[in-house]
Image: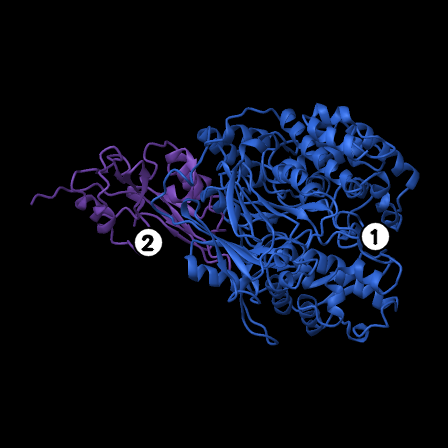
Amino acid sequence: MSKQYGYAGKILRINLSNNRIWAENTEKYEKFIGGRGIAAKIAWNELKPNIDPLSSQNKLIFMTGPLTGILSPGSGRTCVAGIAPQVYPKPWYTRSNIGGRFGSELKYSGFDGIVVEGSSEKPVYICIHDEGNVELLDADELWGLDTFTTQKMLMKKHGRDSVSICIGPAGENLVRTAVILTESGDAAGQGGFGAVMGSKKLKAISISNTRGGVGEMGVIKVADPKRLLELWKKALKLLQGGPKIPEVPSDFLGMQIKYERKYHACTHACPGLCGRGRDYGSFIWKNVPSKRYYTIESGQMRCIAPNFVAFSTEKEAEVKIEYRLSFPEALVLKNLCDKLGINQWDFLGGLILWLEVWRKKKLINETSISNQIDLNNPDFWMKLLYMIANREGFGSMLADGVLRTVENLGKANEYVPYVTCGFAEHGAGRGVWGFFEYPFWIVGALLWATDSRDPFSDTGHAYARLVYGFHYVLPLKDDQVKSVAKKIWGSEKAVTDDYEYKSQVAIWLQNRGCLTSSLPTCDWALPIVASNFTVDGSGDTSLESQLYSAVTGINYSEEELDTIGERIFNLERAIAIREGRNREVDERVVPFFKRPNWTRMITLDEHKFKMILDEYYELRGWDTRTGWPLKSVLEKLDLADVANELYNKHL
Amino acid sequence: METKLIKESGVIRFFPERCTGCGACELACALYHEGSCNPGLSRIRLIKDSFSGNHIIEVCVQCSSPGCYYACPIGALEIDPVSGARFINEEKCIGCGLCAKACPLMPEKQIIKFKKIGNKRVFFKCDLCMNRIEGPVCVEVCPSSALIFLKAGERR
C-alpha cells in the first residue's frame, strides 16, 4: 500500500535480540481493518501455541486503526496484544487497549503499528522521530524509575510534544498484573503486558514529532472530510446534546468535596464530558492537601479508582466488605499504583477484595501478612503496593496474581473474586460489579465464557449503558430500554428477566467489541446504543460504519462492518482453539456464576445456561460439542486459510 | 511610507478551565484546511499537560497592527474584508518565513507554521475559517465550549 485514506501504510517491526528494525506494509492485513483485528492476524501467523509469555519468543503487538489520530470519537486508542502472562492457569493470546495520544502520534510518524519481538540484554527504549526515523536507545538511566518520572524524563530529552508509553517497577519485575502506561493514568491494563515489556528489557517507546514543517510522511488523509465533520457533530449531539460548558458536580461518593477538579480527556479526540458528572467519570483533581503525605498537585480518579476511597458490598453479598480512606490518601495511593505500573482493576476488584474476604474467613492466617491486613489504614495499602511491585516477601507470590497465590498456598479456589482465566470480576454481578442484577449478568456469563480475558472493558459496556444508564447515558425509562433492545437485538427479552435472547446480545456485543478496538473508538462512547437526547432513547449504531466509510472511502454498511467484526472474533477463536480451547474451557465460568448474585441472591441455572450456550454456538456457527468454529463458517468469513490450518494440523 | 487603516479582526478566545485536552480543535482544523489529520497541519495548537490538567492553546490573536502583514515582501499576507482575518494566500507564498519572524508571539508560540509541498515551504496560519458560514471549525467541534469566536465588533 503506498498511501491509503485513514492509514499510515506501514507497520514497524523491531527485533530486540539482534537490533534489527524494518517495516512491512499494512495493506496485506486490510481485511482485518486495524487494531485488534490486525493484531489477531499477526498473532495467528506468528505466535504459535505454548510460547512462554515472558520469553523472547513472545511478541508484543501495538496496533492502531484507520480512525486513530482522526477526528473521530475517542480515536487516540491503540490495541496491545500478545501472549498474556496474567492468564491463569496457562497463558494464552489476548489483547488490551491504551488511550492517550500515543497511537495518534505513532501514525503521524508514519506507522500504523509496532511489533516488538526478541528481547534485549540491557534496558533499552525505542525512540521514533519525525518521518519514521527509529532508534534503539540505552535505558539504563530510566530503569527503576516510576512511570510518571520516566515520561517526564523522556519529554525533557525529546521535547514537550513528545509522547511515550512505558512500564514502571512492576513491569520491570515481571509482575503478572503490570500495565503499560501513558500520561497520568491511561494504561493497557489487561493481560499483564507491562511484564512482557519488562521481560524484553524494553522500558519505553517514545515518539517525538515536531509540530512544524510537516511533509507527506505523517499526514493521514481522510476520504470525505466534510462528512467526517458532520459525523463528529452528530456523535457529540447523541452523547451529550452537543457542545457543553462543563459543570463539575460538587459531591463525590456522597461526600462534599472542596478540592478543585476538571474534566479530563483520557484519549485523543475524546468526545466530551466523560461519565456525565458521575463519580467514576474522567476528572483530574488538583492541589489536594494531605496531612499524612504532602499536597498532591494532581491526579486522575476515574473508572474503578474511586474504590481507593471507599467500597462497601451490597447488603446480600456473600461476605460483607466495607472500607474507607480519606480522599487525599486515596489519591496518593491511586497515583502510586499508576507510578508503579500495577493493574488497578485487578488490584481493587480482585486482590484487595480477596485479601479482605480471606482475612474474614481466616483462610490466610499462615502467612506473614495476615495480621497486618487493614483496609482502613493507608499505610497497609502503600506497603502492599510496594511489596507487589518490588516482589518483596509475600508480595513476590502476589505478583503472580491471586489465583497463582491461592494455588501456591495449597488452598481451594473459594471466595475468590475472579471469574475465569485469571481476570477479576467485571459485569458478573458478584464483586465490584455486584450491583449488576439478574438477568444482565447472564449476558456477562456468556461473554466471560467465550472471551480470552475480562470482556467487559471493551465488549460489555454498551449493554450496561442501555440497561443501567452508564458512561454518557443517564438512566432511560423502562419502555425506552425495551424499545431500544427490540430495535437492536430483535426482542424486548434481551433486557428482561429470562435466559432468552441473551446469546443474541452477547454475539452482537462481541462483534461490536472487535470493531471498537479495531477501528478504534472509545468503548465508553461507542457503539451509541442509547441516548438521552433522542425522543425514544435510541442512539445510532451505524455511526461506526459511517465513520469508517468517511475516513477510508470504502463504503461499508453497518451489516457489512459487523461481518468484519465477526471475522475478527472467529479468528481470535481460532487462535484460542489452537491453544487448546474448547467448550469445556468455556464452561469453567459456571462455578463462579453458581455463587449467589450480590443483589438478589440469584444463582446461575446451570442447565439453562448450557442450553443458551448451545444456542450461542449455533448462532455463531460453532460445533456445540467442541466449541470449534465450523470450517464452512470460517470459509464464509473469508478465513479459508485459517480453516485449513486449524482443521488439517490441529484436529 | 504610506500606511492604510487595516480592518479590525475577530478572534478566537480560550477558556482554560473548560478545556479537557482532547485535541479535537487541532484535528478539525487540519481536517478542514488540509483534508487530512495531523496536529502539525493545524492552525491552532494544543499543548496538553496530562499531569497537571493545565492545557494551553496557542492560536493567532489577529493583531490590530499585524507584524506578519507588514513583513511579507510579496503581499501574500492578506486581510479578509468580512472577518478581518489576517491570512496567508498560499498560492502567493514564496516560503521565505519573514511573517513567522515578524510575529510578536513567536518563536515562544507556534502561530505561523509551514508545510512541505515537495521541496517547497508553504506557510500557513489561522484564517478564522473565513469562508465557512458556521465560523471557525475549532470552535464548533470543541465538546466543552472551551473556545469561542468573537467577531470584530465584539472584541474588547
Colour logic: by chain
What is the drawing colour of chain B?
Answer: purple
Left or right: B7, with A78 as reference point: left
Q: Secondary structure at mark 2?
A: loop
In the rendered view, would you say A240 is above or below A640?
A: below
- Looking at the image, residue A352 sits to the left or right of residue B60; the answer is right
Quarter where residue A64 is shown? top right
- Using the rendered view, name the quadrant where residue A611 is placed: top right
Disc 1: CA contacts within 10 A as few (<14), some (14-19) or many (>=20): many
> Residue A110: percent from the left, percent from the top?
46, 41
Q: Amino acid at mark 1?
A: Trp
Residue extending farthest to the left is B1
Mark 2 burial class by Cα count in 10 Å: few <14, some 14-19, many 20+: some
Report which residue position mark 2 lands on.
Answer: B109
Instruction: Give the camera-side residue of B93 and A272.
Output: B93
Answer yes or no: is residue A136 visible.
Answer: yes
Q: Is residue A253 visible?
A: no
Q: Name the subunit of mark 2.
A: B
Q: Is residue A633 left or right of residue A10?
A: right
Return the residue at label 1.
A598
Q: Position of residue A244 (x, y in %)?
A: 51, 45
